[in-house]
């Protein structure tokens, strides 16, 4: 339950208005292509594709960054090359915690390489994997085809699971999934990807003690799409990963000493191994670089409720190691750790009509080693970076039974400007600071009309941006950074409801009022320049008898400036309306249930791009497919 102290992903009452949840049923109805496609359907989200070593950028409300958690395992920055491989059928629930003032969920700064310390996170994306509710088996297969001569793509998943015992005091479960995904491409696009996945989980409850285990392993390749230049010619660089191998292992334990005293423990390990190839479409040049990283972590939290007061105390620690070259450098070696702790209190007043909360968090990165040259492996040893410090306040006031007001305030001081290779060409770089405020009014007016209006303001001092100028160090090429103060302000309207028993809908509009950078007293407007002003989403689902039809529409405004490692380019970006739809039919073949789904993505065949680096990276366009799922 959302408010239960045994819920490891519990967020404060004042933060739930900014939290969006996609259940397994929602995912089946939306029929996205992968996890990034699912996130792109969330309110205020803008997913852009770069086509290089950090392919996907996921921003909310004009910017920011997220911390990703799978079953308690905090993922490193390489997540943008991992998540596309996670089978959607393996997800029980995906939760987006925006602008979080919930400080117990995870670290406030990214874990991993020493270069990941720049910036405070905007929120969390929490994924819970599927657990069986009964003895069940599900076999799912799909085929799809994109226009333009692309080969047929296939996807196959087999899930098996069962419950063990039916006593509320002693019970358990075990489940497993195997899947294969293959989306081949043609050389004129070079955007193929495939993955072989295996996942298993198990858990048990004995009295007041509960324990869960999860393991996921994946291996596949990833081709970085060719850019289409201004004159329509293709970029000749041929970049790809083969294989990308990743493993996530996690366990969590809950001890409920009494109805009001609960201790939660989680332990995790992630490994990431890649072979990166740099080749050309016009000659035989080829180079291969092998890079590997490993992260281990542990978190401990105690939740104590005293009448109407909830106190949460916790700490988390992670250690990360990496070795090998990649596109950034011919040599990387790092050994870092992040130690953090948090404390929060939540107070309910006036028969729970008013809820107040306050929290503090501190995270400190320690660098045992950070080097970009074997000759410097002994440098930068045993260094404590300045700690990141966060203060948060929240309130929720239910004015009447159908109307509630919510407010949150967040102040974060990063403590460090980044790793040892982050340099400024003109002067000193300073730690980043953030001040965030949100106010929202929501109403359960009627089942068919549940609106919520949110105003948000995010101010970041000393925000870092890569310049177009580079320098060379130990055979590696790096970009100088600059810093500026950023202000993002906007409003967000969401309306959802159920019409009678068979139709549900959700519509949202995110409007950026300001998105400005100020440097040396000069203010630059990014709104509609490097970021879209408006984002709209619409989702409708209707069921009749054994049929269900689902429609998803996203409209994004245009922008024309794109900054990447290749520099800043002016291009026609965004300005698209994407329409996805599907219709499914149930066939009752007792004791089995067969579901047939006909689906289409980008039905309007919009040729849109969201970044320009080595060229435009266009969407594939209209894609249609068929999925069959047999469940026992």
Image (cartoon, rainbow, N blue to C red):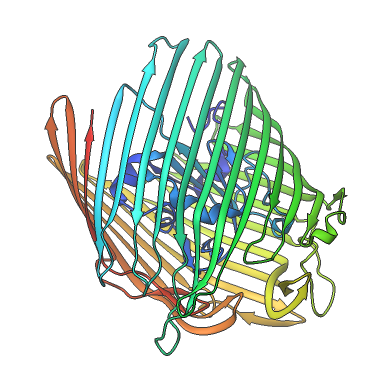
In this rendering, position of residue 39 left or right of residue 356: left
Q: Could one spot residue 103 in this view of the protein?
A: no
Tell me where residue 364 appears, x and y as whole percent: 79, 47
In which image quadrant can residue 630 be found?
top left
Of 499 and 330, the residue lying toward us: 330
Tell me where residue 329 appears, x and y as whole percent: 69, 66
Which residue sits at x=51%, y=31%?
214
Of 336 and 602, the residue lying toward us: 336
Q: Quadrant of the C terminus?
A: top left
In this rendering, position of residue 595 left or right of residue 537: left
Which residue sits at x=41%, y=34%?
130
Which residue sits at x=56%, y=56%?
275
In which image quadrant can residue 141 be found?
top left
Which residue sits at x=38%, y=45%?
88
Classify 394 as above or below 476.
Answer: above
Tell me where residue 416 appears, x and y as whole percent: 79, 58
Classify 293 as above or below 215.
Answer: below
Q: Could one spot residue 385 in this view of the protein?
A: yes
In which image quadrant can residue 616 be found?
bottom left
Classify 312 as above or below 323.
Answer: above
């Amino acid at each position: 339950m959302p408010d239960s102290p045994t819920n490891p992903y519990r967020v404060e009452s004042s933060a739930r208005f900014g939290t969006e949840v996609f259940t397994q049923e929602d995912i089946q109805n939306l029929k996205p292509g992968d996890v990034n496609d699912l996130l792109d359907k969330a309110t205020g989200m803008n997913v852009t594709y770069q086509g290089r070593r950090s392919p996907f950028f996921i921003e909310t409300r004009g910017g920011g960054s997220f911390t990703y958690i799978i079953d308690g395992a905090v993922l490193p920055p390489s997540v943008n090359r991992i998540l596309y491989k996670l089978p959607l059928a393996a997800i029980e629930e995906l939760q987006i915690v925006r602008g979080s003032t919930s400080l117990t969920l995870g670290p406030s700064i990214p874990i991993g390489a020493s270069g990941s310390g720049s910036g405070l996170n905007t929120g969390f994306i929490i994924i819970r994997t599927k657990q069986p509710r009964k003895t069940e088996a599900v076999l799912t297969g799909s085929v799809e085809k994109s226009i333009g001569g692309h080969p047929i793509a296939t996807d196959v998943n087999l899930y098996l699971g069962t419950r063990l015992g039916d006593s509320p005091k002693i019970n358990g479960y075990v489940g497993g999934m195997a899947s294969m995904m293959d989306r081949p491409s043609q050389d004129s696009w070079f955007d193929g990807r495939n993955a072989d996945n295996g996942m298993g989980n198990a858990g048990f409850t004995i009295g007041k003690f509960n324990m869960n285990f999860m393991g996921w392993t994946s291996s596949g390749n990833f081709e970085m799409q060719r850019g289409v230049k201004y004159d329509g010619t293709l970029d000749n660089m041929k970049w790809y990963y083969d294989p990308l191998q990743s493993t996530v292992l996690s366990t969590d334990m809950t001890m409920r000493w009494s109805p009001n005293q609960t201790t939660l423990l989680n332990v995790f390990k992630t490994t990431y191994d890649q072979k990166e190839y740099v080749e050309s479409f016009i000659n035989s040049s080829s180079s291969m670089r092998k890079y590997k990283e490993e992260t281990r972590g542990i978190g401990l939290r105690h939740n104590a409720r005293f009448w109407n007061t909830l106190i949460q105390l916790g700490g988390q620690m992670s250690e990360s190691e990496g070795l090998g070259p990649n596109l950034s450098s011919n040599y990387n070696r790092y050994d870092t750790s992040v130690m953090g702790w948090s404390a929060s209190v939540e107070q309910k007043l006036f028969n729970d009509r008013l809820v107040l909360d306050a929290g503090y968090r501190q995270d400190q990165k320690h660098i045992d080693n950070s080097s970009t040259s074997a000759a410097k492996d002994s440098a930068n040893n045993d260094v404590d970076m300045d700690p990141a410090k966060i203060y948060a306040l929240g309130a929720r006031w239910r004015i009447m039974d159908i109307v509630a007001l919510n407010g949150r305030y967040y102040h974060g001081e990063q403590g460090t400007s980044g790793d040892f290779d982050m340099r400024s060409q003109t002067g000193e770089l300073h730690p980043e600071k953030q001040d965030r405020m949100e106010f929202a009014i929501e109403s359960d007016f009627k089942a068919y009309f549940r609106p919520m209006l949110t105003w948000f303001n995010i101010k970041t001092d000393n925000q870092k941006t890569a310049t177009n100028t580079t320098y060379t160090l130990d055979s590696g090429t790096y970009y100088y950074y600059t810093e500026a103060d950023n202000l993002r302000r906007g409003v967000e309207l969401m309306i959802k409801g159920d019409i009678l028993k068979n139709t549900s809908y959700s519509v949202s509009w995110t409007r950026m009022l300001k998105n400005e950078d100020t440097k040396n007293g000069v203010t630059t407007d990014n709104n509609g320049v490097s970021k879209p002003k408006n984002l709209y989403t619409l989702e409708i689902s209707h069921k009749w008898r054994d049929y269900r039809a689902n429609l998803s529409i996203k409209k994004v405004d245009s922008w024309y400036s794109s900054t990447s490692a290749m520099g800043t380019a002016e291009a026609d970006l965004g300005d698209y309306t994407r329409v996805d739809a599907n219709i499914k039919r149930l066939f009752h073949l007792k004791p089995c249930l067969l579901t047939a789904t006909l689906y289409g993505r980008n039905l309007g065949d919009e040729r849109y791009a969201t970044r320009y680096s080595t060229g435009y990276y266009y969407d594939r366009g209209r894609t249609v497919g068929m999925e069959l799922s047999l469940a026992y």
